[in-house]
Amino acid sequence: MTTVAPSVAGTRWLENEEQEAWRAYLEATLLLFDALDRQMQQDSGMPHAYYEILVRLSETEGHNMRMSELAVQTRSSRSRLSHAIDRLQERGWVERADCPTDRRGQLAHLTEKGFAVLSEAAPSHVAMVRKHVIDRLSPEQIRHLADIGNSIIAGLEPTCASADRG
């Protein structure tokens, strides 16, 4: 039984259990991202989005990535990423460079200072992820969480990829 009257013909409303699952997922996600962002601001003076950029760069060989690929990896628009890179560049954590294989492209490069900031920020971030997610779940629940997340991602990636091209 649904709590909303079906006013739109053909709408397949959520059953009570589905609605409960959706709201629990949504609230948990919002609370978690809010907590992670507050912790990152408090401990490292940067938003979680900047931390994610530094992480992605740290995981690449040479700590370089094309700006367009970094935008895809961080699920960010190119303009939003460019603004974030400007702020990270002002702090000396990232540098921009022209792409040697494509004159139109630019690379973002994680500096030694940026890597040091990331190395200092990572332990408290990992502790938060452990405290609020990993340590609250059994190994089986963690596997289910990964499966659920990957299923949702698989359904959204084609939509997100086509939106990014626009």
Image: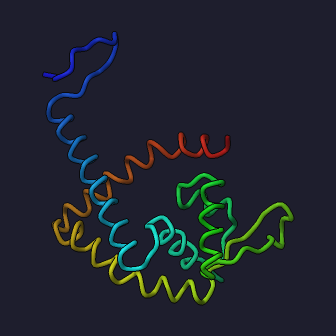
Q: Quadrant of the C terminus?
A: top right
Indicate the position of residue 116 as horizontal and vertical percent values: 51, 89
Indicate the position of residue 71 as horizontal and vertical percent values: 61, 58
The structure residue drawn at horizontal position 63% and vertical position 61%, both measured from the top left corner, is 83
Left or right of residue 101: residue 26: left
Indicate the position of residue 146 as horizontal and vertical percent values: 32, 59
Left or right of residue 127: residue 121: right
Which residue is more in the foreground, 92 or 8? 92
Where 160 falls versus 108 (above or below)? above
Left or right of residue 123: residue 2: left
Where 68 falls versus 159 (above or below)? below
Q: Quadrant of the N terminus?
A: top left
Left or right of residue 64: residue 58: left
Indicate the position of residue 18 as horizontal and vertical percent values: 20, 35
The structure residue drawn at horizontal position 61% and vertical position 70%, both measured from the top left corner, is 87
The structure residue drawn at horizontal position 60% and vertical position 73%, both measured from the top left corner, is 88
Q: Hey, which residue is sitting farthest right in the picture?
A: 103
The structure residue drawn at horizontal position 18% and vertical position 28%, both measured from the top left corner, is 15
Q: Quadrant of residue 115?
A: bottom right
